[in-house]
Amino acid sequence: MFKNLSIRIKIILGQILLTTLVVVFIYSYYPRQQEQAALRAIDSKIKSISDMFSIGVGIGMGETDLVAVSEALEWAHADSSVVYISVVDHNNQKIAQFNIVGQVPDIGKILKDDSIRQIGKIVYYKADIQYQNSSFGTLIIGYSLSHVREMIGDLKRTTLYFCLGLFTVGVVLSFIISNMISGNIRKLDIAVNAIANGDVNVQVEVNTNDEIGKLSRAFNNMLQHLDKSRTELVKYSEQLKKQNEELNQFSYVVSHDLKAPLRAIFKLSEWIEEDLGTNISEESRKNMQILRSRVFRLEALINGLLQYSKIGRMNVAAERLDVLSMLNETIDLLNPPSHIKINIQNGMPVFNTKRYLLQQVFINLISNAIKYNDKAEGIVTITVVDIGKYYRFMVEDNGMGIGKAYHEKVFEMFQTLEARDKVEATGIGLALIKKSVDDMGGVILLESEETKGSKFSFTWPKAA
């Protein structure tokens, strides 16, 4: 629960706790120390009084002058705290007594105890009465602690008032210091919440030059940079929107205005060939076929460019995809020749993803594996590995392979391994694959050697 409190409350509680500990220590320690010091002073004083009385009383008893003993007791009036004096001989008989207590203490118990005994607020001391190295009895002096108790009581009250004042000052200071420390923090918190709620025109008012004040200034500078970046981002966003519109318009022109003449050229070549009939030479017929193949290639190139330009701009919705079913559909669509065998690993995943992009990747990889396979018995193997947040798909073949010098180059636009007259290709397929994988946050890698086949592996996120 304490960790959920604000910094201001934590500072206040911490300072109050510290002040409380100091106050409790002062109130419990100082009066006790003063009381012990006072009792030590009283003990020394009573010993002096006891010695003084025992000398005077000893002289009187040694000279058998009881009047001198009585006069010695009269000295007790000089100290108001001396409330009881009793002279007892060896037979425990009282020779003289001075008593303003009213109640007579039990002399027998006092004589049996050590030199000091406290009864109520009175401390009783006893000392031997000696004269010329002879003992004549015992002197008992009662010293009242009332004055000391009153003094200690006054001291405790004074200490209590001081501690209460100290506690009050500590509490007030804790609020003042907490406000000084947490003021800028609260302003920062308010500014951050305002930004989180969409208010970008926020500044933190700085009143101090301490670490928090410097942090507030840095926060204001960061907000200014963010505002500048936001303005530039809006500007770039508008430019990008305009460029996308232009690109869409260009795609429309390419798709309609360029394909139509190509179709016309294709049909025109057929009509010319039909019109000439048997009068056309074999060389001219071959040239017409080359012309139509070039038309097909150009149309495929245009379609590839359109697909490449749409990746990342198309709003392709994610859907539940059974990869095994999709691969079977793709293989049926490509219709591989009989000498090519395609193996698919068991346990292909079923997950939500952009079906169109993933299918285009597999179409290009499998078609390349078929197209560039020069073996009498071609084998294409498709496998998958679960690597946490991604699947790693692999398409491996035993075809002609790719030299290491071309491993990076094959992913560039318009790059082909064979001459276009030998193998019909646009050189866009692998560039399309790389762009699609990159757009999904994956990575595509190639492992291959010439004549030893190729292995393309790419990662694909589980969550689209």
Image (cartoon, rainbow, N blue to C red):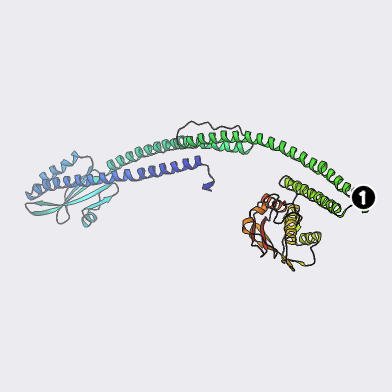
Can residue 107 be spotted in the picture? yes
> Residue 167's image quarter?
top left
**Residue 29 sits above or below residue 400 on the image:** above
Percent coordinates x, y for residue 169 in the rendering: 41, 35
**Residue 418 sits above or below residue 339 on the image:** above
Name the kind of residue labelled 1 in the image.
Leu
**Residue 287 sits above or below residue 399 on the image:** above
Q: Residue at x 71, y 46 (%)?
A: 312
Q: Residue at x 64, y 36 (%)?
A: 233
Percent coordinates x, y for residue 134 in the rendering: 8, 54
Residue in the foreground of this view, choosing between 424 and 135: 424
> Residue 149's image quarter?
top left
State how many labels appear. Answer: 1
Percent coordinates x, y for residue 394 in the rendering: 68, 61
Residue 197 as seen in the image, left or right of residue 262: left
Can residue 199 be spotted in the picture? no
Residue in the foreground of this view, choosing between 116 and 223: 223
Judging from the image, what secondary structure is the residue with disc 1 in?
Answer: helix
Which residue is under mark 1?
Answer: 276
> Residue 250's image quarter?
top right
Q: Residue furthest bottom?
A: 377
Residue in the foreground of this view, choosing between 219 and 333: 333
Percent coordinates x, y for residue 54 in the rendering: 13, 48
Residue 221 as seen in the image, left or right of residue 358: left
Residue in the foreground of this view, choosing between 364 and 201: 364
Q: Residues within 10 Å of mark 1 (few under 14, many from 20)?
A: few
